Image (cartoon, grey):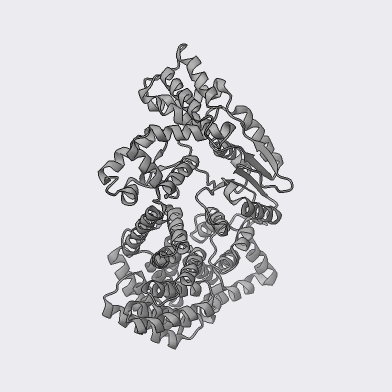
Amino acid sequence: MAHQLPTEHTPFIGRRRELDLLRQLSARSRLVTVTGLGGIGKTRLALRVAADVADGFADGAWCVELHELQDPELLVHAVTTALRATDHTTRPQHEVLTGHLADKHLLLVLDTCEHLIGACAELVARLLAAAPGLHILTTSRQPLGLSGEEIFAVAPMSVAPDAVRLFTQRAHAAHPEFRLTARTRPVVERICARLDGIPLAIELAAGRLRGEETEELLALLEDRFQLVRDETEYTGRHSTLRTTIGWSHELCLPAERLLWARLSVFAGSFSRGAAEKVCADAALERSAIGPLLLGLVEKSLLVREDGSDGEKFRQLDTVRGYGAEWLRRLGEEQRVRARHLDWCQEFATQGEAVWFGPGQTAVFRTTRRAHAQLLAALDFALSTPGHERAGARLAGTLWFYWVGCGLLSDGRYWVDRALAAVPGPHPERLKALWVGGYIAILQGDARPAAVMLTECRAESLRADDDAAYAYATHRLGCAALMRDQHATAERYFRASLASYAELGELDSNVMMARIELAMALAFQGDLAAAVPLCEEARATCEEHGERWAKAYALYVLAFAAWAGGRSEEATRLAGDCLVINYEFRDLVGVVLPVEVIALLWASRGDCEQAAVLQGAARRIWDRVGLPLFGSVYFNAPHDTAVALARETLGDQGYEAAFERGGGLGLEEVVALALGRAQEPMRAH
């Protein structure tokens, strides 16, 4: 069962009664909103309950963290991406999302909704209406205001024992010699009471214990609260948390305060190297960033995480918000966000360069993990005057991510925004045009693709941009290939390959041009010329450690092996192709070998399984765009398999098996096609 819940990095303390009540409420209501002020523990409570009840949902529990999202227009994109509802089509994202959830029994946690309250309410209402098996648990400082919404208000921690236990645990982490004794317990209880039992305030105070005894800590707190009592615009517990964060801010070194503010531009977790690139300057030396990060961790103002990709840091939402406000007061927000954009561009440029090589899989993983950072940078650039061209450059540089990693819809959105923001004949626009045209082709959106690619060719000629001209020519060949205009496609592919050679270009795009030329030749009946081209492309990819383009060469070679009567070789090649493209979550690259495997099964007489696999393939095509690109020639293996299966099973038997296949998830389809699992709905 799939779950997608954040890892808890510290023990969950107390809240037994709240846990029991919220579990019960979540079981009987399809919409529960956990409310309370910032720092009260809404997120931890909701995630713990979600983890506890996840096994009761056939499709698991999934969390979407919204605190980094500022644009309501991106809400549906964010939820769709988090749920891995991959869809390459041009359908509206809300249709993709409701379609994905329609038959799911799933718990969805939407964390931190208050700054997007209207958009969240609209989306939640739509999802609940479309998906009867969906339960939604939200956290927000205010209710969504929907009919049937159950409100669970989180109160402060009771001083004894929960708040005292929390303080003790965090104080011990900061100062291992600390022990709760008969002498210190009353003081700790007074500290927790003074902090109104607010977990975040308690954690911040406990983090200060490294250099102070509990009595001194209490005295400092009392002095601080007395100072701000008549000055603050906040009241009650809001004032308590605000005062505690402000107190932590004042107790930081000046360099720590500055770093805290600058780190607020990061969306999600970040590495030490990223912090150095974005935050270091004459006022903050690069060599000081590491020690300052650790200092903020010790003060509970940063969370340190060690994962498979090394050491990372992140800020809690409330702490980050304070830092962002301080950054604006310093007048540095635009400058530091621009540096964050520069870092994202450098990251993407490196990924683009490494994509054609043995680091391709690592690029896929690291870029996926940087998704929130990249989107934050794109949003800043494309909505901030003076940075639009940088945004267009970033959107174009990420072509490998949009196309190779199953994010066509995201890529189309950002490229379209970039083209709207950069109307002039700039190099950044030219690259965005051919990338946008490429994406549109794969989505089956032929007319916009032709417009973008034709404009790119014309403008690149005027600008003497030979690279953009070559890439646009190549993609016009793809458009012709999808329209079954094979001779035209061949001319475009040969012209682009000649241009690539003159330019010294050698990357995954060049490999794809060779493979697509082979497809055009094969569709014209010239397998004798097509196979050597694919063999050459495969050898070049293997020489450089490239796998994504290689998989498409394997697809063509699998079809050629079937046509030559070598079914065992064809099965192996199609399986290898499927494994690679599934790893990259490239749906086009997944469904094409699935169609070949269905053909192989039908050819050997396993027609029921072939029909099941074809039903599964059709569901994937629905997420890609136009099935088999609307091409007679791409359809040929499919149509041959259909004819064989219908002849054996009859129309009724074929339709029944086809329908069963449509109920399989992507993981089940891949496992079935690779022979690692029996089709679970076969017996009737």
Asked if 171 appears above or below 558 in the picture, the reply is above
Instruction: Count how many numbered circles sit on residues in the image.
Output: 0
Q: Is residue 575 visible?
A: no
Residue at the outermost front position: 230
Q: Residue furthest top?
A: 182
Q: Nearer the viewer, residue 661 or 83?
A: 83
Q: Is residue 419 left or right of residue 96?
A: left
Q: Quadrant of residue 393?
A: bottom left
Residue 316 position within the rendered picture, expressed as x and y whole percent measured from the top left? 47, 40
Question: 216 or 374: nearer the eye?
Answer: 216
- Residue 2 location, x and y as percent? 54, 48
Residue at 49 percent across and 81 percent down: it is 451
Q: Residue at x 57, y 60 (%)?
A: 73
**Residue 640 image-quadrant placement:** bottom right
- Please determine whether, in this image, residue 652 is positioned above or below residue 14: below
Q: Position of residue 432 (x, y in %)?
A: 42, 71
Query: Which is more toward the observer, 425 or 33?
Result: 425
**Whether residue 8 is situated above or below residue 549 in the rendered picture:** above
Residue 339 appears in the figure: yes
Q: Residue furthest right?
A: 147
Quadrant of the drawing holding the C terminus: bottom right
Residue 313: x and y, percent?
39, 42
